[in-house]
Image: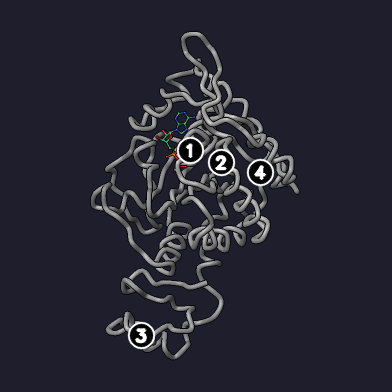
Amino acid sequence: MADVPSDAPEHCPGTQSESAGKVSACQGCPNQSICSSGAARGPDPGIELVRKRLESVKHKILVLSGKGGVGKSTFTSLLARGLAAADSDRNVAILDIDICGPSIPRVMGVLGEQVHQSGSGWSPVYVEDNLSVMSIGFLLSSPDDAIIWRGPKKNGMIRQFLSEVDWGALDYLVIDTPPGTSDEHLSAAQYLLNAGLTGAVILTTPHEVALLDVRKEIDFCRKVSIPVLGVVENMAAFVCPKCKTETAIFPANTGGGSKMAMELGVPFLGSLPLDPRLARSCDEGTNFLTDVQDSPTTVAFNKLLKDVVEACEESRSS
Ligand code: ADP
């Protein structure tokens, strides 16, 4: 996979590419002659850098979804907050590699924070003593900035994120990814599989259009050997806070996430109901799990959290 130096021009083809040093974007780049000679090609040095950096991280969890808008970032934030709150001796972090739509800074209430660089790498932003966050969103001059990068440049940024953040010793690193199966996923998989990836949690909603894409996501995991920790079905039902009547917002016409998980032979971790207070909490960057403890979503999430922890322990020991 292509590797891009941090000082690369905008459309750098990557040092590992056959066209390295030979395309118009390379004109004027200080690395042009070494790239065109082919001397920079070889095993990606990033793989070893990522492995070394993540040696002190016990569990590395990818959060994946086939589609955007199914609640991947919301789940990532709940998972990290839930893991950190359950044990104050546990160190947890979120890495947001959703380069085109980094929403973690907002959801975690750290929008506009600055990342500092020290001799040992980039320092993540701390939400709690045992919960830190790193996101491309911290590096943008404004939250409305669009990031229009080609594949190799994105891969270079992901490698930097995985190899240059000074996390310290972590029990859990939860990685929020863009939807689908694109360059970012291939890069992350390549680096993380060599660094001992615990596995992936896959988010979906119950309707068939979302499930179709999840099947592709599971197929991708199998092809690149990412262990699937399980499927989570989000926004499965709405429980009226007044009369407690449960309504299926996205009807599971084809059996929903649990049937699909059974068919594909992957664990089903559970369903999270829709709660408008959760959407508000994400917009405001507050901690829904502690603020709205009686929500059916909080209750369902707390049960699901135990299953995720168990799945992680099982994956590590297998
Ligand atoms: P993704 O990361 O998959 O694109 P988000 O996590 O950004 O999706 O969620 C999309 C929107 O749905 C957000 O506004 C979020 O607050 C909301 N949302 C996600 N899950 C729930 C839920 N269970 N109940 C209510 N709103 C939710």
- Indicate which label's residue lies in the foreground, 3 or 2: 2
Marks 3 and 4, how far apart in space? 43 Å
Residues at discs 3 and 1 in contact (Cβ within 8 Å): no
- Indicate which label's residue lies in the foreground, 4 or 1: 1
Mark 2 residue crowding within 10 angstroms, few (<14) / some (14–19) / many (20+):
many
Q: Mark 2 points at which residue?
A: 203
The earlier-in-sequence mark between 3 and 1 is 3
The picture quadrant where one finds residue 202 is top right
Q: Residue furthest left?
A: 141
Label disc, if present, on residue 71 of the rendered structure: 1
SS at mark 3?
helix
Q: Is mark 2 within 8 Å of ligand 1?
A: yes
> Which quadrant of the picture is home to ligand 1?
top left
Residues at discs 1 and 2 in contact (Cβ within 8 Å): yes
The earlier-in-sequence mark between 3 and 2 is 3
The earlier-in-sequence mark between 4 and 1 is 1
Label disc, if present, on residue 32 of the rendered structure: 3
Marks 4 and 1, how far apart in space? 17 Å
Q: Name the residue under label 4.
A: 229
- Indicate which label's residue lies in the foreground, 4 or 2: 2
SS at mark 1?
loop
